[in-house]
Amino acid sequence: HHNGAPTVILQSGSGLNAFDADTGESIWDLGLSCGTVSSPLVVDNTLYVTSGGITKLDLNSSAEKPKVIWAVNKLNANGASPVVLGDNFYALAGAIAKGANSNTGEILWQLRLKGRFWATPILADQHLYFINQDGLVQIVELDGDGDSQAASIVSVIDMGEPILGTPAAADNALFIRSDKHLWKVTKTTKVK
């Protein structure tokens, strides 16, 4: 929202733009060249956008345009969108998963995964689920002290089919769509 009106934010290689959703009138335009594959992410009136790396913008600012809070080139999201929960920020750059402090952009950990990725990771029950294009689900456990200073792969499931879509979490299960099936995965699921 901008001055109480619903706002549409669009990113492109030529800039980041905000428009009044009711009138289509331009509200602001930042000359910030943005990636067009990863979706921008709005969390508590801040905007995370891919722009060479990740840029965090303050949408609460009374200024005409949002202020840059931080920009970190080493935090990049190539295809998959970033994930934010509280003070923790997660991005997938190629096959490198990265955890960072969402307030500062400081990278806290990096972890090499297998394969090429398109699906956005999902966070559930202190675990990040990364699914590569070949259908390999790599489950990464975050440390238990709440600040996610470390991570490790604790399980790998081969779904045996190409997967490009982002999984969904509901009712203590993950729903994963492959080229041929819709899978429901729970803690007790046995993959054949």
Image (cartoon, rainbow, N blue to C red):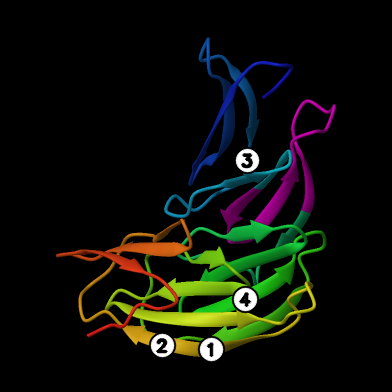
Q: CA distance from mark 2 to mark 4?
A: 18 Å
Q: CA distance from mark 3 to mark 4?
A: 27 Å
Magenta stretch holds residue 65? yes
Residue at (73%, 38%) from the top-left corner? 45
Amino acid type at mark 2: Val
* Residue 153: numbered disc: 1
Callout 3 secondary element: loop
Callout 4 secondary element: strand
Labels 2 and 4: the sequence-earlier one: 4
Residue carrying label 4: 98
Residue 114 seen in this snapshot: no
Residue at (45%, 74%) from the top-left corner? 130
Mark toward the viewer: 2 or 4: 2
Amino acid type at mark 3: Gly
In the picture provided, is 158 more to the left or to the right than 70?
left
Labels 3 and 2: the sequence-earlier one: 3
Q: CA distance from mark 1 to mark 3?
A: 39 Å
Q: Magenta span covers which residues?
A: 48-69
For the residues bearing labels 4 and 1, Cβ distance under 8 angstroms = no
The x and y percentages for residue 188 are 40, 78
Labels 4 and 1: the sequence-earlier one: 4
Q: CA distance from mark 1 to mark 2?
A: 8 Å
Mark toward the viewer: 4 or 1: 1
- Could you say which is closer to the camera, residue 67 or residue 162? 162
Amino acid type at mark 4: Lys
Identify whether 116 is placed above or below 81: below
Residue carrying label 3: 31
Identify whether 165 is placed above or below 14: below
Callout 2 secondary element: strand
Mark toward the viewer: 3 or 4: 4
Labels 1 and 3: the sequence-earlier one: 3
